[in-house]
Image: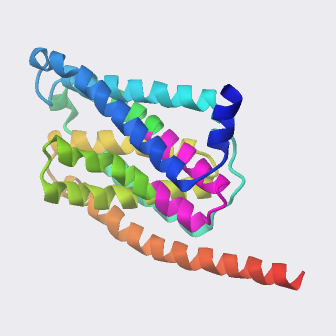
Amino acid sequence: MRKSWVEFWDRGRWWKALILAVGYLALYESASLLMAPFVPFIGGAESASYVVVLLVVPILMGGLILVGFGASVRWLRSTFARQSIRGGGWMWIAVAVVLLFNVMRFASIDYAAAGFDWVAAWLLAGLLIGFTEELLTRGYVVRIMRSSGRSEIAVGLVSAALFALLHASNLFLGQPLLSTALQILYTFFFGFCMYLALRVTRTIVAPILLHASTDPSIFMQGTYPLTGPLASLAQLGNIVVVLVGVVLLVVFLITERRSAARLASTASIV
């Protein structure tokens, strides 16, 4: 039985990546619903209990499920091993831009007003979010797409698209359509930047850590911002990531197609 299960997932097909993403999303949302009875007993979004109950616990459940899945198909070790596919030096731009704005946001948070418990809860939530969502999209999805024989263009785009899909579900939770559309736009290009981080560092640890520092910095700085030029500049981070992501996507498409053409030319000569 286990052999059949492993063989099924080892035979890469793009729709299996979709099934895995949708399945994870369903389980995560179910875990969130299990927390609903505790809502009356926790504070608002500015309380540590709110972050722990509605973010940390559900994402922890989702992460454990993904780890269990990876263990069942024997993917965990290879997922965290050094990647064989290299990336171009220009891909470091994605890492630098995301890291720069994360640092600026962390530097423009009113930690005294936020309180130690709330900050600690958000840092824990960020670590779990980064680990879980990157394990799924830059780990398992990338593996499935590569084993299907798809080009790296397809790998990168599908990885980013399924990452954006995870956040599209907010529309069904009452988030306005325009806000959801903007979130999908941002998460697609952020997800693409994380794929570039995976390529250029050749390890999934890099996108995990970048992602782990992104969500806490955005939400903490948005809730308890300091005033001043640095804070104002830091708040432009999402817009900059989208704009830089667009440019890097164009460069990515051009360089990957040129690389494929060179390989095809070399193969025909041989």
**How are the residues colored?**
rainbow
Foreground: 55 or 15?
A: 15
Residue 22 horizontal side relative to residue 180, left or right = right
Give me the residue at 22% from left, 22% from top.
48
Residue 133 horizontal side relative to residue 168, left or right = right
The span shown in magenta is 133-159
Give me the residue at 50% from left, 31% from top.
66
Q: Dividing the image into 4 quarters, which one contains the C terminus?
A: bottom right
Residue 224 horizontal side relative to residue 257, left or right = left
- Residue 92: x percent and y percent? 54, 62
- Above or below 113: residue 151: below
Q: Does the magenta-highlighted stretch encompass residue 25? A: no
Magenta portion: prevailing SS class: helix
Foreground: 111 or 123?
A: 123
Give me the residue at 15% from left, 56% from top.
177
Give me the residue at 13% from left, 44% from top.
174
Foreground: 190 or 266?
A: 266
- Residue 211: x percent and y percent? 42, 44
Residue 248 horizontal side relative to residue 86, left or right = left
- Above or below 33: residue 228: below
**Farthest residue toward the right?**
270
| Residue 216 in sight here | yes
- Residue 123: x percent and y percent? 35, 31
Q: Dividing the image into 4 quarters, which one contains the N terminus?
A: top right
Task: Give the quarter of the image for residue 82.
Answer: top right
| Residue 225 in sight here | no
- Above or below 12: residue 26: above
- Residue 46: x percent and y percent? 14, 29
How many numbered dots are placed on residues in this image?
A: 0
Q: Does the magenta-highlighted stretch encompass residue 149? A: yes
